Image: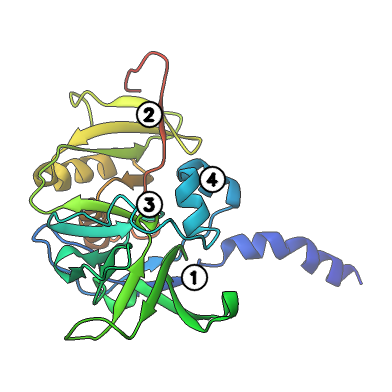
Amino acid sequence: MKLMLLMLAMLPVIATALPSETLPVRLLDMDGKATEPVVVPKIVKPEEVWRSRLSGEQFKITRGHGTEAAFCGVFHDNHKDGVYACAGCGLPLFRSDAKFDSGTGWPSFFQPFAAENIGRKEDRSYGMVRTEIHCARCGAHLGHVFNDGPAPTNLRYCINSGALSFFEKGAKGPDKVYFATGETGLKGLEGLNGISGSLDGRPVTEVTVTADDFKTLFGRALEGGATAVFFTTPVQEAMARAEVARLKKGNDVAIELAGAFTPNSDGKQR
């Protein structure tokens, strides 16, 4: 009996020590191409965290399996070149060159950015049998896929704008990136006008950087003791994961889409 009680007491410790579930996905490199498959952790967050990270409409769609009104989504009539990513975790989902006007009132695509990045499951709601699609990494509901699309796939991925973010092709930034600093601060970023603050309750330093300079900056941050990087563009994620793999720091540095940043009252880097 004592042994059983001891084992039960250890369960929370054992559970936290287990590695998180992972999956292979393809990311977006600096040349606008899909990377080779990269193994990343699946993302699971409490409802209150999703509510704090997403707008009310985004939460209703991605976490509540809702549907926005036809012809009302911000990306329904978007004709710019670029990549559409998951609003919840930043995973690339669709390219603009696969987008077409289906006449339905929702953004429509004939193929995804990468098959690995899209999950599917049967949806029997509202008395219909459909194929629901979701972000493979964070499970965000995106929409449905139908067999009435154009060649060459003959598929129509019918997607809610509220499930997506858009990154225009050729945009050079500058963009924000956030490094977890810990209570003692972060070395290696001196002179970059970093702003100290918090993100999801963690102390971070906000830095403005172009994609061309990101690799050097990221290396300096790792050398300075950064334990996490919160990216704001898909290219930042691909570069960060490549650098972490090169330095063999995969178990030491968390990489995740940035949420809302709150600067410290003095706005200074710590």
Please name the residue shown 33% across and 18% down the image: 268
Compared to residue 104, the image places residue 87 above or below, namely above
Could you tell me how far apart the alpha carbons at marks 3 and 1 are, in whole angstroms? 15 Å
Please give the residue where the numbered disc 2 appears in the rendered image.
185
Q: Quadrant of residue 112?
A: bottom left
Please give the residue where the numbered disc 1 appears in the rendered image.
21
Compared to residue 142, the image places residue 262 above or below, namely above
Tell which of 88 and 226 is nearer to you: 88
Label 1: state its secondary structure: loop
Discs 1/2, front: 1
* Residue 226: % across, % down: 34, 42
Could you tell me how far apart the alpha carbons at marks 4 and 2 are, in whole angstroms? 29 Å
Figure coloring: rainbow
Horizontal side of 190 relative to 195 (left or right) equals left
Q: Are marks 1 and 2 in contact (CB under 8 Å)?
A: no
Q: Quadrant of residue 237?
A: bottom left
Could you tell me how far apart the alpha carbons at marks 3 and 2 are, in whole angstroms? 20 Å
Dot 4, how many residues are within 10 Å of its Cα: few (below 14), some (14-19), or many (20+)?
some
Dot 1, how many residues are within 10 Å of its Cα: few (below 14), some (14-19), or many (20+)?
few
Marker disc for residue 51: 4
Q: Going by the picture, which residue comes out furthest to the top?
A: 266
Tell which of 56 and 214 is nearer to you: 56
Q: Going by the picture, which residue comes out furthest to the right?
A: 1
Q: Mark 3 or mark 2, which has the lower sequence index? A: 2
Label 4: state its secondary structure: helix
- What is the quadrant of the N terminus in the image? bottom right
Horizontal side of 253 relative to 56 (left or right) equals left
